[in-house]
Amino acid sequence: MHPLVSALEGRLIVSCQAYPGEPMRDPGTMAQVAASVERGGAAAVRAQGLEDIRQVKGAVDVPVIGIWKDGGEGVFITPTLDHCLAVIDAGADVLALDGTSRPRPDGRTFAETVAAVRERFSGPIMADCDSLESALAAAEAGAEIVGTTLAGYTDARPRTEGPDLELLSELAGALPATSVLVAEGRVHTPAQAAACADAGAFAVVVGTAITHPTTLTTWFRDAVES
């Protein structure tokens, strides 16, 4: 197991992202957010966009999981080999990309993309998956980290209210020893994060509930106004 991966066992990963058009959509701001969550105990951070990756990398000592979202439909999380190589060149310690079986914009399969990446990059690869089938295929293709990131965001599975604990439990008993399971997606409370760990997650990613004040404000606003 890669040392960067083994260091994440039983730990929290925090996704530091802001959406286009939001006040916090600034690489420098995201770097400050990343430094703040590192101080709070995050074992790694996930950053989106090339300049965000560069600035976050300079602001933290923990590993940076890099992605590049391009588009809004279909495969858009680090969707092509060119996107992958750019994320690596920006300084990501871990490359994360869409790990589903959906068609990719450059025509490559996930396995072909991983094989091409391996010619340039020896660090861990994280597959953002949507189902048991895609996760197992990603592990077979060589992804050291398999995440439930896209479960409920494609047609493969219905969207659960919180994290997809059923999928986590299935994967915990099915993944090969060469890959670790990371829970990601709709982990909104400490209790849900603990439930992910209990379901067999090697590590847990939390984003919105820690780093997205606009959404957090709406949760509290709705509670007060109701």
Image (spheres, grey):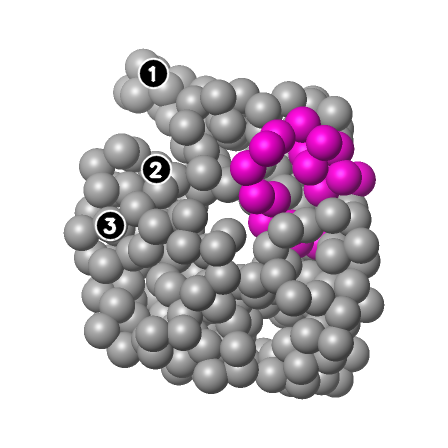
Q: Which residues are magenta?
A: 51-68
Return the residue nearer the eye: 97 or 45. Answer: 45
| Quarter location, residue 220 | top left
> Looking at the picture, which amino acid does disc 1 mark?
Glu
Q: Which mark is residue 188?
A: 2
Q: Alpha carbon of mark 3 to alpha carbon of mark 2: how far?
A: 14 Å
Return the residue nearer the eye: 6 or 211. Answer: 6
Crowd band around label 2 with a 10 angstrom C-alpha radius: few (<14), some (14–19), many (20+): some
The residue pinned by badge 3 equals 197
38 horizontally vs 159: left or right: right
Crowd band around label 1 with a 10 angstrom C-alpha radius: few (<14), some (14–19), many (20+): few
Residue 57 belongs to magenta span: yes
Of badges 3 and 2, the one in the foreground is 3
Q: Label 1: state its secondary structure.
A: helix
41 horizontally vs 99: left or right: left
Q: Which mark is residue 225?
A: 1
Name the residue at 41% across, 48% down.
Answer: 8
Marked residue nearer the N-terminal end (3 or 2):
2
Q: Alpha carbon of mark 2 to alpha carbon of mark 1: how far?
A: 20 Å
Q: Label 2: state its secondary structure.
A: loop
121 horizontally vs 94: left or right: right
Marked residue nearer the N-terminal end (3 or 1):
3
